[in-house]
Image (spheres, grey):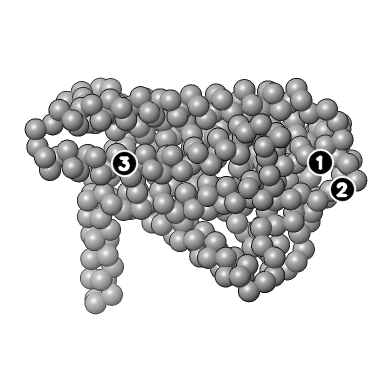
Amino acid sequence: MSSFPVSLLFESMKNGNTTTYFILLGLFDHTEAQRFLFAMVLTTALASLVGNALMIFLIHRDVRLHTPMYFLLSQLSLMDMMLVSTIVPKMAADYLTGKRSISPAGCGLQIFFFLTLGGGECFLLAAMSYDRYVAVCHPLRYPVLMSWRLCLRMTAGSWFLGAADGLMQAAATLRFPFCDAHEVDHFFCEAPTLLRLACADTFVFEFVMYICCVLMLLVPFSLILISYSLILAAVLQMRSREARKKAFSTCSSHLFVVGLFYGAAIFTYMRPKSYRSANQDKVVSVFYTVFTPVLNPLIYSLRNSEVKGALRKYMGQCSALSHD
């Protein structure tokens, strides 16, 4: 799938952009405080990679986790791993080596993968909220309402819609001619930041991008709110106080992560241009590229008794092998 976007990105550069490279100004300066922040971000990114990789491994290995819900969780972990891998290694290399240049092709690929994974995650979170709604509100009909066929279609649809948005925005952004100042005031290539360097009228494209953001962000977010509202209504009718407490705890933690992810994305992509600030964009981008991915395995999975059971089972097997 990647060869087609790459060819289209190169074609975009030939048609409209003669820039040979961009300079990413980065997130950190070489001061003591910034070095600590860099170490914290890098540690968080590594923890995210390990946590999400562990989730994928456990879901793959344990037969009890071979259900639509855990399959969706494994796809979320895969998206988070790829998102961190798209952004953090380049940011870390730039900081450590001081070489902050990136080619237009590399910039286009960062935009494409970032939007593919971010957009795909928006729709995947909506699919997961539907799965929870069916499990709580219609448990007896769960195998019918949340069949494997529907699960796979929702997953494929999430990847496809994210890739379509990423390809369109990456190709369109690189078609603009850029001014002499090739400095991107960010730690990775993001379409709104890159458009500030364009030496052409970007109003039409920004309007189209705004419409895409409404579809990619607000529509799935609305579906999530509807699903959890129905779940909340069902929970309030439960007679068991313990069941209500458990459901409230699960839903509130899920909504916290969803709110953090969507809030940061909406703040970045749906603010009026006159209210945008480079420093604000960089700080907010850290939340949904680094910190949200490390929260997902903790909130969605590692608090789950079935996942913890699978982890204990695997650790027990490893311990038994080490004593043999």
Task: Between residue 275 and residue 101, name the one nearer to us.
Answer: 275
* CA–CA distance in space, label 2 to label 1: 7 Å
Give x and y (percent) for residue 142: 23, 27
Q: Look at label 3 and name its amino acid.
A: Ser
Whichever of labels 3 and 1 marks the residue nearer the N terminus, that label is: 1
- Report whether 247 appears left or right of 214: left
Residue 252 is labelled as 3
Q: Which residue is mark 1?
A: 197
Give the SS element for disc 2. loop
Residue 177: image quadrant is top right
Image vertical order of residue 188 relative to residue 228, above or below: below
Whichever of labels 2 and 3 marks the residue nearer the N terminus, that label is: 2
Give the SS element for disc 1. loop
Q: Which residue is mark 2?
A: 181
The N terminus sits in image quarter? top right
Q: Look at label 1 and name its amino acid.
A: Leu
Please indicate, yes or no, whether residue 136 appears anywhere in the rendered image.
Answer: yes
Task: Between residue 90 and residue 217, name the one nearer to us.
Answer: 217
